[in-house]
Image (spheres, rainbow, N blue to C red):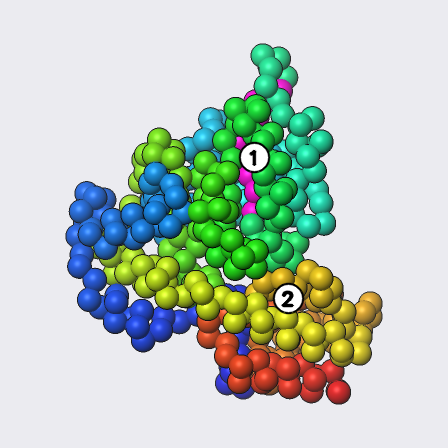
Amino acid sequence: MKTLLVDLRSDTVTRPTDGMRAAMLKAPLGDDVFGDDPTVNGLQDMAAELLGKEAALFVPSGTMSNQLALRAHTRHGDEVIGHSGCHMFNYESGAASALAGVQFRLLASDDGTLPLDAIKTSIHQTDDPHYAPTTLICLEDTHNACGGVPLPSKHIAAVAAIAKEHNLPLHLDGARFFNAITAKGISARELAAPFDTVSICLSKGLGAPVGSILVGREDAIQRAYRFRKMYGGGMRQAGVIAAAGQYALQHHITRLSDDHRRARLLAEHISTLPGFHVDLTKVQTNLIYFGLEENHHLSLLSPTGKPRLVHELLELGVAITGGPYRLRAALHLDVDDAGLEMACNAFSRVADV
C-alpha cells in the first residue's frame, strides 16, 4: 500500500489539532472517580448547558454512553423500541442483552424514522406476564445505517408525544448529534429538548481523540454514574482527554458544514462514474453511502480479501470501507479541499475515467 493520503474510512480517524493538543497539555487534573477533576467537571457542565439539560457524564465511548442510558432507564427483562438499523442493536456487540438484560422491539423504515402506528401497537404496558414491558424508546440522529440522514424535527416531536402519552423516557443516540443540528439549522437545545437522555460523541466529527458524554435528567445521570463504574468506565486523571472534548465543543461545531459540503461534492463526482450509483437525496451530512452495479469488476475480491475498489483506492492512498456493493466514505476534520480533490482523482482513476 502506498502512503495513505486521504482517510475516508470514518470520522473517527481524525488527529487532535495543534490547539487541541495545547489544551490537553495545560489541563488542570484531579481524580475523576472522586469527582474532583476540574477539567472533566467543566466539560460535563459545558455539555449540559449546551444541550439545556440538568447533568452530564463523561465516558470513554459512545457505546458505553448508549448502554449506560439503557441501564438508567430500564430493568432486566424490559423491552426497548428502536429502529431495525440502529447502532445500539446492531453494532454494540450485543451489550443491550448481555449487560442491560433488555431486548429490542425493532421497527423498520428506509430513513431512520420509526413508523408511528407501529410504535403505538408495539408498546406493552400490561400485567400480562407473556409480554416484556416496554420502558424506553430510542432514536438515532443522524442515522448512520440509513445514509447519515438527519431525522425530521416533526417526526421527533411526534415520537416524543407518543412517549409522553405512555409515560416512557426517550433516548437519543446522537453519535453525530452536531452533524444533525448543522444539517437542520437548529440549536443543540432544540434537538435535545424532547429527550430524557442524549449521547453525544466527541471523537467523530468534533475531532477529539476519545470520549462521549451522556446528557440528561439528573436522576438518569446519577444512575448512569454508578453503572459507569460497574462497566469499568471510571477514569482517574481524565482531564487530559476531557480538555480535548472542551476544545472540540468550543471550536469544531461550526466547521461541520465544511464536511457536509465536501461530502456532497464527492458524492456528486462518484455519481458521474460509470457503474457507480449513489442516492444524492440521502447525502445530507458528512457520510456518503454508494454502490456498484451487480457483477461490476470493482466489486470482485482482490488478493487482500477486500473488494477491488477498496483495494485499488488504497493503492492510490485513499481509504474507504464497505463492500462489495455497499460502500461508505466519511468526510471529516482531516480532509480539506486538497484532500477532496485527491479523492475525486483517485475514484476517477480506478473507474478508468
Mark number, residue 288: 2
Residue 99 seen in the figure: no
Name the amino acid, label 1. Answer: Ala
**Mark 1 lies on residue:** 160
Q: Is residue 132 magenta?
A: yes
Q: Position of residue 348 (x, y in %)?
A: 70, 84
Residue 125 position in % (x across, y down): 59, 19
User: x, y (%) of residue 79?
Assistant: 57, 29
Where does the magenta region start and end? 131-140
Instruction: Give SS at disc 2.
Output: strand
Secondary structure under the numbered disc 1 in the rendered image: helix
Query: Marks 1 and 2: which is nearer the front?
Result: 1
Write the residue at 22% across / 68% down. Answer: 25
Q: Considering only order in the chain, which callout, 2 or 1, is on the residue closer to the N terminus?
A: 1
Dividing the image into 4 quarters, which one contains the C terminus? bottom right
Amino acid type of disc 2? Ile
Q: Which residue is at the far right?
A: 294
Q: Quadrant of the N terminus?
A: bottom right
Residue 352, numbered circle = none
Identify which residue is drawn at 54% across, 44% down: 88
